[in-house]
Image (cartoon, rainbow, N blue to C red):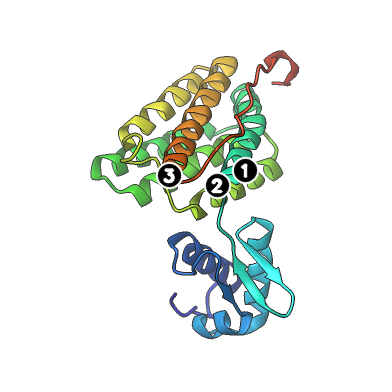
Amino acid sequence: MRQIDTDRNLAKEIFDELRGAIVSGELTPGALYSVHDLAARLGVSRTPVREALIQLSERGMVRFERNRGIRILQTSLHDLEEVFAIRLLLEVPATFRATGQRPPGWIEELSGHLAAMRTAAGQHDEAAFMAADRRFHQTINAASGNLRLAHYIDSLRDMVLVRGNSTVDRSRTMHDILGEHEVIFDLIEDGKAREAAESMRAHLLHTAQLLLGQEAAAGGTGDTPLPELNLDWTNFPG
């Protein structure tokens, strides 16, 4: 981890640095760390580090252990199953609602994220691709009008990242993933709320099935099936 420039936005800098160290594996899953040690490594005081760790604990990335320190948590297969089940329950109707509401400038913003994904796929830049993928989903969820939902879903993605694996170049290519997002975007742009929501549902299910399948093959077991969601879109206000 690098030292933090205290002249910048300290709280966000510390949170982002710790989160990145957890996702990259620099902070080892299962290991214990002290607030004092982490603060020293970042070159800052303990108080903002503790505040950042509280946020990370709320995201399920760390756990405070009394008189012992902070443990870096490893996402289990069951955790992944739950994350995708929750995303299916929340993100699909959010897509339906967002498509119907169409806030000003939203389509253009979404198109920009898709273009960034396309560029990153062409350059085989997985980090840039996944960052744009995340912004694409976050933009849709925020456009549903429920910012708390958007923030919560975004936090769930961190639990997948902590697992340390991606489907990119294992179960599918970046261009395959891009294609699924292009379908979603085209339906959103055409104002087809029901079809866009169904396309989002198919995308999330496909991602979950591939990720859980490759993780189970790597040594885990995933015996909790993802739910079959037969949602009645007429119950969601547009």
Task: Choose mark 1 or mark 3, whichever is in front.
Answer: 1
Going by the numbered disc 3, the residue's amino acid type is Ala
Residue shown at 43%/77% (left/top)?
A: 2
Q: Are marks 1 and 2 in contact (CB under 8 Å)?
A: yes
Side (left or right) of 154 relative to 233 = left
SS at mark 1 in the image: helix
Could you say whether the residue bearing mark 2 is in a helix, strand or loop? helix
Front-most of residues 168 and 147: 168
* Sequence-first disc among 3 and 2: 3
Instruction: Report whether 68 appears left or right of 84.
Output: right
Residue 225 x, y percent position in the rendering: 60, 29
Task: Identify the residue under disc 3.
Answer: 132
How many residues crowd mark 3 within 10 Å: few (<14), some (14–19), many (20+)?
many
First in sequence: mark 1 or mark 3?
3
How much space separates mark 3 and mark 2, taking CA atoms?
A: 13 Å
> Disc 3 vs disc 2: Cβ atoms closer than 8 Å?
no
For marks 1 and 3, give the CA distance.
15 Å
Locate the C terminus and report the quarter of the image it occupies: top right
Other-residue count near label 2 (Cα within 10 Å), few / some / many at <14 / 14–19 / ≥20: some
Dot label at residue 157: 2
**Amino acid at pointer 2:** Arg
Residue 209 percent location from the top left of the image: 49, 31
Residue 13 spot, x, y in % from top left: 53, 69
Q: Residue at x 60, y 27 (%)?
A: 95
> Which residue corresponds to mark 1?
153
